[in-house]
Image (cartoon, rainbow, N blue to C red):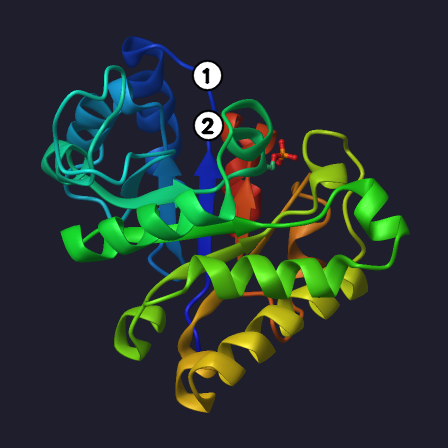
């Protein structure tokens, strides 16, 4: 039985002081240990938030990293820096990074390999645009994104990564995928992982759904057989996150 994993993606919100405040206000109510809970915070907030969460089961994650170890890459942050700051997870290939910061399937793969090598668990984001859904290519696209992201990842490492299916049309729009739509694609992701590796890996890997997850729809989504939790944007910045975690 896979343990649910519910991550808040705070995106570009909260100064360090505000982040500590939010972490303090949420930590008591999302710490039951029944699901893995992660706060993916802006890089500058990782150190203070990790400190605020000491003694809880809640982990901290980054929202991006670069695939080189160090060097002349102004503005970038390495996997080692994230780890040393207290992050256990890192979101890689979020659609906002693909859309606004030129992230590609190839850079996603390089970052995934570096994160794993460095001991950070990647949360790999895949998902289609509305046009792609209307063209009927959602499953093909997501299979391809998953295959490229996991290129050269060993079976043992793949079993530990997290994949987040986030249809772009559902992000920040209030338009959630139905639980059937989300299940169909999350299952397709698990199936392709089974094709690349084997049944053992596909049964272990955790697949999240993300896109307008809220207190009202979390329970139905997370009850689907291939949905192992959620990657939550807007609702992770509010007390509502407690209801999602304790669905
Ligand atoms: P919303 O929950 O705000 O739709 O954002 C989803 C998301 O992008 C999480 O990574």
Vertical placement of residue 102 versus 138, above or below = above
Callouts 2 and 1 close, C-beta under 8 Å: yes
Residue at the spot of label 2: 10
Residue 109 image point, x, y percent:
39, 52
Residue at the spot of label 1: 13
| Viewer-proximal residue among 205 and 224 | 205
Residue 111 image point, x, y percent:
32, 46
Residue 213 figure quarter: top right
Query: How many numbered tags mark residues here?
Result: 2
| Viewer-proximal residue among 68 and 161 | 68
Q: Can residue 19 be seen?
A: yes
Label 1 beta carbon within 8 A of ligand 1: no
User: Cα distance, mark 2 to mark 1?
Assistant: 6 Å
Label 2 neighbourhood size at 10 Å, few (<14), some (14-19), many (20+)?
many
Residue 63 image point, x, y percent:
38, 33
Q: Secondary structure at mark 2?
A: loop
Left or right, 135 with respect to 170, comes to right
Vertical placement of residue 118 versus 2, above or below = above
| Viewer-proximal residue among 203 and 94 | 94
Residue 236 image point, x, y percent:
51, 33
> Residue at left 33%, top 49%?
110
> Residue at left 46%, top 67%?
206
Q: Secondary structure at mark 1?
A: loop
Left or right, 66 with respect to 128, comes to left
| Viewer-proximal residue among 70 and 167 | 70
Vertical placement of residue 69 versus 204, above or below = above
């Amino acid at each position: 039985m896979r343990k649910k994993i519910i991550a808040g993606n705070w995106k570009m919100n909260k100064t360090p002081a505000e982040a500590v405040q939010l972490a303090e206000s949420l930590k008591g109510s999302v710490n039951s240990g029944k699901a893995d809970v992660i706060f993916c915070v802006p890089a500058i907030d990782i150190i203070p938030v990790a400190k605020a969460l000491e003694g809880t089961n809640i982990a901290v994650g980054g929202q991006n990293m670069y695939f080189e170890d160090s060097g002349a890459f102004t503005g970038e942050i390495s996997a080692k820096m994230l780890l040393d700051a207290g992050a256990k997870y890192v979101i890689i290939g979020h659609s906002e990074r693909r859309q606004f910061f030129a992230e590609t399937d190839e850079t996603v793969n390089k970052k995934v390999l570096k994160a794993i090598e460095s001991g950070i668990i990647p949360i790999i984001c895949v998902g289609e645009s509305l046009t792609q859904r209307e063209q009927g290519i959602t499953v093909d696209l997501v299979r391809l994104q998953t295959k490229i992201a996991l290129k050269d990842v060993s079976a043992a490492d793949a079993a530990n990564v997290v994949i987040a299916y986030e249809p772009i049309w559902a992000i920040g729009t209030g338009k959630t995928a139905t639980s059937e739509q989300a299940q169909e694609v999350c299952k397709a992701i698990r199936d392709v992982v089974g094709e690349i590796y084997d049944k053992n890996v596909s049964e272990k890997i955790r697949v999240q759904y993300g896109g307008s997850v809220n207190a009202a729809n979390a329970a139905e989504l997370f009850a689907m057989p291939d949905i192992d939790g959620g990657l939550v944007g807007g609702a992770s910045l509010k007390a509502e996150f407690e209801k999602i975690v304790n669905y």
